[in-house]
Amino acid sequence: MNVAFLGLGVMGGPMAGHLASAGHRVSVYNRTRSRAEDWAREHAGSIAATPAEATRGAELVFACVGNDDDVRAITLAPGGAFEALEPQAIFVDHTTDSATLARELDAAARARGAGCLDAPVSGGQSGAEQGRLTVMVGGELAAFDRARPAMEAYARKLVHLGPTGSGQLAKMVNQICIAGTLQGLAEGLHFAKQAGLDAHAVVDAISQGAAQSWQMDNRAATMLEGRYDFGFAVEWMRKDLGLALDESRRNGAKLELAELVAEFYAEVDAQGGRRWDTSSLLARLSSPDGER
């Protein structure tokens, strides 16, 4: 298929690469052109100067950028993708953004006779690189069925969850659960150290029982080392939890723990941890002598 991919960051770059490897004709756009040039040296595809140029003639248009404002800039602003979105084409937004924006984009796509899916992903950079992302999708089922074969190039799990906005709402659920799990893990590790236990041995024991989680398996060791210079950044988790808390004020959901953990992440940010991995919640529980 003729496809476009807008945004070649740590997630979008690998995803676009999987589409090219699957045989699709890929036109890419990235705000920093040098990153698009680096991508093109590694993969078969063409570079566009604007989102509209990348979109022209594409049957599917994918986007993976930072936040609501970034998505609007590449879609609805002058030179944006929706200027050139073909009738019957489908716009697939893999950015984690608001359900409100998902509905706004859907209306704009419909006005052009096109389709729109909100399709945030989970799995992180490694999942994108390995083509093993989980994709949560909202929008019309017919559009999902048309886009699904292409998305399978980088997804191990694709789930259609309902009408427009459902994908973004499901991603909020995902982030709420992760935040709570990480806070519990941080407190557990902190408690083990304060109690004089061998925290590594404790993790080895409890990771075989009901306390086991992906976060424990993949982050406990680096947390105990005080190493956070990798992974999903605190600034992005703060953004994601902010979206969930905003939505909860509209739908009446009580997110007491999520609200508390959002405050904890603000403290980590203030410690200089804006780009630290989200497991850095343990850093704010440091002992007075600075040992983590």
Image: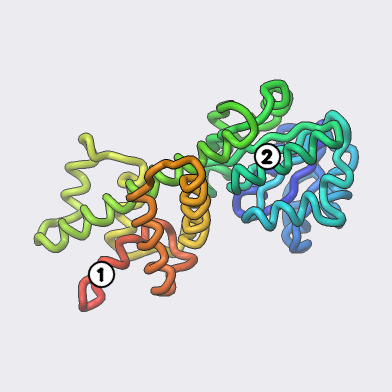
Q: Classify residue 145 by image quadrant.
A: top right
Q: Of 141 and 94, which appears nearest the observer?
A: 141
Q: Position of residue 131 (x, y in %)?
A: 58, 37
Residue at 27 percent of width and 50 percent of height:
184
Residue that mark 2 sits on: 103
Q: Classify residue 217 by image quadrant.
A: top left
Please determine whether, in this image, residue 143 is positioned above or below residue 135.
above
Q: Residue furthest bottom?
A: 289
> CA separation, marks 1 and 2?
43 Å
Residue at 61 percent of width and 37 percent of height:
165
Q: Of 272 and 168, which appears nearest the observer?
A: 168
The answer to whether residue 123 of the structure is visible from this angle is: no
Q: Position of residue 200 (x, y in %)?
A: 21, 53
Amino acid type, callout 2: Arg
Please determine whether, in this image, residue 260 is positioned above or below residue 20.
below
Please determine whether, in this image, residue 133 is positioned above or below residue 35.
above
Q: Is residue 231 left or right of residue 141?
A: left
Helix or strand or loop: what does disc 2 sit on? Answer: helix
Residue at 38 percent of width and 47 percent of height:
255
Residue that mark 1 sits on: 286
